[in-house]
Amino acid sequence: MRWLAFGTYDVHRHPRVAVLIDGLREAGDDVVEVNDPLPLDTAGRVQMLKQPWRLPVLAWQLGRCWSRLVAGSRRARKDGEVDAVLVGYLGHFDVRLARFLFRKTPIVLDHLVSAAGTATDRGLAGSGGAKQKLLRWIDRKALNSADVVVVDTPEHLAALPTDAHDKAVVTPVGATRAWFAAQTADRADSEPLQVVFVGLFTPLHGTAYLGDALALLADEPGIHVTMVGKGQDHADCRARAAANPNVEWIDWVAGPDLPAFVASHDVSLGIFGTTAKAQNVVPTKVYQGAAAGCAVVTSDTPPQREMVGEAAIYVPAGDAEALADALRKLAADRAALKTAKTTARQHAEEHFYPARVVAALRDRVNTPVPTRG
């Protein structure tokens, strides 16, 4: 097949589409990218709900990107017929442009998270009201524009409107080849346990509980934790963890450097939040940490159990004591740590490698899909 990966997606902020592209190419398909990243991250887009007067800025930026996408699409079509169009994550608007440009071509939407769900999780829109109605309308229009909808968990499939279930396919987020190429470091048992967290400090991540767990580990010199990233709960997390001198805070690590950086640690932390969204997602960092061969510690939620399986060590969501205890055990039992790292890596290779991730998607698209006249 010849695919067109299309949209304003940013693989550095949201690597999910990069995994799909890697997988399609590994499976033998031709993938042409027509991509112009929108210079606005998820937080910036959602923040506009609080400052609606900034919406014209979004429209202007989107319009500039779209003009280049239209030109790129024309060039791609001159080089050969397109069999399917893959619209990358955060493509709620892009998918409608794709539908307009490719009226008779199957359109695949990577619908990782709904706009309404993201805004609710970040406390910027309640369950009702005009803002939530607008976001649900945006979600609905995006889904209606797609022939195939890709979600990452059965829970997200269940959350789709009923009439979208038949065109949905569940695929794990997985990790790009760069994460599998990274290798965790071998350290002497006498060295501190190296733990890393990478994230944007949103309620989904549960960094308040993580901060409390770090405080509980203040007297544990054998556990060193590196916290990477910033976001709305960063200051609170840092204040809660202030008693621990063995915590290092880093603003960010560049995308190309991140796999090797994470792989230089023993343990990669997932999410620990108790929000509704936190109960229904499997974060990218969990797949990436396992692919890099780290021991992964994350919250015990149904989708993570189902999609990640034995690749992780689970603790109750929102339980700082349990999280601190899990890290103590790994620091004290290096044989158990080695087993956890090996198990995570093997499971990732069997289930999260790009070519395996896209298998169900390729089967779904290769099944005749009704196109629009």
Image (tube, grey):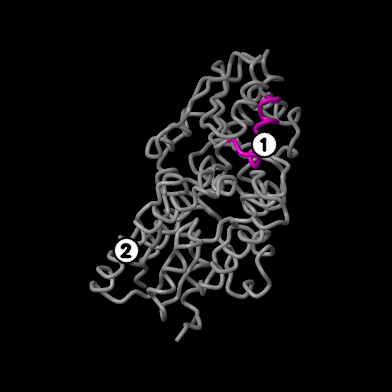
Graded by Cα atoms within 10 Å as few (under 14), some (14 to 19) or many (20 or more), the crowding at tag 2 reads some
- Depicted 80 relative to depicted 16: above or below: below
Q: What's the residue type where badge 2 is placed?
A: Val
Bounds of the magenta segment: 201-213
Residue at the disc numbered 2: 32
Residue 265 rendering spot, x and y as whole percentages: 51, 29
Quarter of the picture containing the C terminus is bottom left
Query: Residue at (68%, 13%) from the top-left corner?
Result: 219
- Depicted 28 relative to depicted 183: above or below: below
Residue at disc 2, secondary structure? strand
- Depicted 122 relative to depicted 137: above or below: above
Residue at the disc numbered 1: 206
Magenta region, main secondary structure: helix
Of residues 217 and 274, which is closer to you in this image? 274
Residue 222 rendering spot, x and y as whole percentages: 61, 16
Q: What's the residue type where badge 1 is placed?
A: Gly
Query: Residue at (61%, 39%) from the top-left corner?
Result: 202
* Residue at the limit of the structure toward the front, as seen here: 53
The image quadrant of residue 317 is top right
Comes first in the chain, label 1 or label 2: 2
Of residues 17 and 48, which is closer to you in this image? 48
Query: Residue at (75%, 39%) from the top-left corner?
Result: 316
Residue 262 rendering spot, x and y as whole percentages: 48, 33
Of residues 281 and 63, which is closer to you in this image? 63
Graded by Cα atoms within 10 Å as few (under 14), some (14 to 19) or many (20 or more), the crowding at tag 1 reads many
The image quadrant of residue 325 is top right
Q: Is 350 left or right of 236, judged from the image as shown?
A: left
